[in-house]
Image: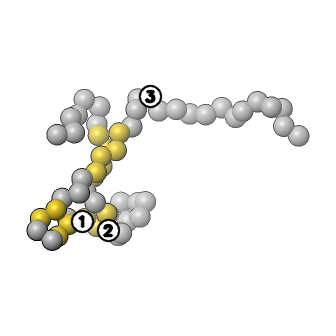
Amino acid sequence: MTTGQAEPRDFPTRPWVGVGVVIFKDDKVLLVRRAKPPRAGSWSIPGGMQELGETAA
């Protein structure tokens, strides 16, 4: 039986922004092999997390 109250949740102290880019040259696309989990060793587009105060350009 439940009490009807939701479990407490942890929230980040700031927004998390993920960025990725797709780079084309002629008939090719740049891919990178992921080094860290999750999905270490798989192919992906270049990207990562944007730090607080960092611009995307």
**Neighbourhood count class around disc 3 (C-alpha, 10 Å): few under 14, some 14–19, many 20 upward:** few
Q: Position of residue 4 (x, y in %)?
A: 80, 31
User: Which three-letter amino acid code belongs to the residue tagged 1?
Assistant: Leu
User: Of label 2 and label 1, which has the lower sequence position?
Assistant: 1
Q: Residue at x 24, y 65 (%)?
A: 31
Above or below — where is 10 with respect to 27? above
User: Of label 3 and label 2, which has the lower sequence position?
Assistant: 3
Choose between 49 and 31: the one closer to the eye. 31
Give the Cα separation between the discs numbered 3 and 2: 31 Å
- Left or right: residue 16 versus residue 25 is right
User: Of label 3 and label 1, which has the lower sequence position?
Assistant: 3
Residue 2: mark = none
Residue holding disc 1: 31
Q: Residue at x 44, y 28 (%)?
A: 13
Residue holding disc 3: 13
Give the Cα separation between the discs numbered 2 and 1: 6 Å
Above or below — where is 20 with respect to 8? below
Residue holding disc 2: 43
**Secondary structure of residue under mark 2:** strand
**Neighbourhood count class around disc 2 (C-alpha, 10 Å): few under 14, some 14–19, many 20 upward:** few
Q: Residue at x 41, y 29 (%)?
A: 14
Choose between 37 and 42: the one closer to the eye. 42
Where the N terminus falls, by quadrant?
Answer: top right
User: Which three-letter amino acid code belongs to the residue tagged 3?
Assistant: Thr
- Left or right: residue 33 versus residue 16 is left
